[in-house]
Amino acid sequence: MSTHQDPLVDAITLGVPTLLQLLDGLTAVLERFNPDQREQLLAILQPEQAKLNTIQQTLETAAFPDHVARFGELLMEAIKNADKAIQHIDHSALDPMRILAASRAVCRAKEALFPCATLLAPIHEFFLDPDMRRQRPLTEANRASFEHCQVIHQTHNRETRGGYSAFVPPAAQQNSRPLVIALHGGTGHGRDTLWHWLTSARANDMTVMAPTSIDDTWSLFQIELDLHAILEHLKDLTANIPQPSAILLAGMSDGATYALQLGLKRPDLFPNIAAFSGMLDPSLLAEPPSPSTTQHIYWLHGHRDTMFPFELANESVAALKAKGLNVVLDEQPGLGHSFAASRVPATLDWFQTAIEGT
């Protein structure tokens, strides 16, 4: 039972941990979503949703003091997006694309919460990899470091295409650090994709740039179109920070397919590739390997992927290895065609090892 007499304080004290736990749960559920288990998942999620809705009603009627009014707005936005995510899962039996919408709602809840991480320790810990939580408490030093993190949205609201979002940790503002270019899947948006990578990038002092394709998906049949935009974004981002020490071109679904195309055609620009649930254009196998560049590819694929079957990924990896490329296949038995957020830390560990071995 709460010892506070202030309903607003009670709502925040109960609501923030409930929200964070729900977002962690939604991230895990959406990664391994199985339509056959939808009813069982909703039976777990909906009681937490009801609890959060009650807290939301209290927050909506409460008067936040002026100095924390913005915190109140952001907290409410995060709660509403978590609620939307569960609603999308609830309606996914009739429209499977709702699962993608649910994932985007979770990303938007995280975006709303990020500026609050210097205010409350639980939110600060939420933006750390799970194995690092409780190891980096919200001390004054950590608070100052977090306040210097930059999240940039360059011509990049969700109604426009062709811009980029970025996360720049304090270390990368002063020193040359690795950079991840994270490409979304078809019809996706970089402003959402950023939040799949930010937490692990922060743990590794890496910059993330998440561009949005000019059209609904990447220019797979005219690769120079989006490549030109990506290089312009990179030029813009690095105008005020040191040049990156290494670049990882990563992508999901169509983004992975495009990353493989760019990397194999331009190994001079992108010697390190991470492909999540993509496919390989067979014509790329005819490209001669670069004599001057060591190419590293991390290919992650789920056995339950029905869009790009695992068997095709396995054959592509074997063909790339036969071509002499350094390829790691990360098989995920329970994964379908969804973003494997839990494997981002392992991907960045692989990237760091690839850098050190170059």
Image (tube, helix red, strand yellow):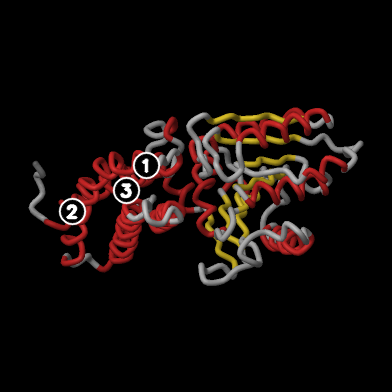
Please name the amino acid that badge 3 sits on. Leu
Residue 60 vertical placement versus 16 (above, below): below
Give left or right: position of 98 versus 281.
Answer: left
Q: Is residue 28 left or right of residue 315?
A: left
Nearer the observer, 84 or 42: 42
**x and y percent of residue 41 in the render?**
30, 41
Instruction: Inspect the image, locate mark 1, and give the three-letter code of the amino acid beneath it.
Output: Asp
Q: Name the residue that disc number 1 marks.
A: 24
Classify the position of the C terminus by image quarter.
top right
CB under 8 Å between discs 2 and 1: no
- The residue under label 3 is 120
Badge 3 marks a residue whose secondary structure is: loop
- Mark 3 or mark 2, which is nearer the start of the sequence? 2
Q: Which residue is located at x 49 percent, y 43 percent? A: 199
Image location (x, y in percent) of residue 339: 52, 44
Give residue 248's quadrant in the image: top right
Gap between marks 1 and 3 measured at Cα: 17 Å
Any part of residue 173 in sight = no
* Count of marks overlaid on the render: 3
Q: Position of residue 291 (x, y in %)?
A: 91, 36
Which numbered disc covers residue 11?
Answer: 2
Does dot 2 land on a helix, a strand or a loop? helix
Distance from Cα at disc 2 to Cα at disc 3 = 14 Å
Quarter containing the N terminus: top left
> What residue sits 28% from the left and 39% below the top?
40
Q: Residue at x 79, y 36 (%)?
A: 295
> Image height check: is 325 above or below 217?
above
Mark 2 and mark 1 lie on one chain; the one further toward the N terminus is: 2
For marks 2 and 1, give the one nearer the viewer: 1
* Helix, strand or loop status at disc 1: helix
Q: Nearer the viewer, mark 2 or mark 3?
A: 2
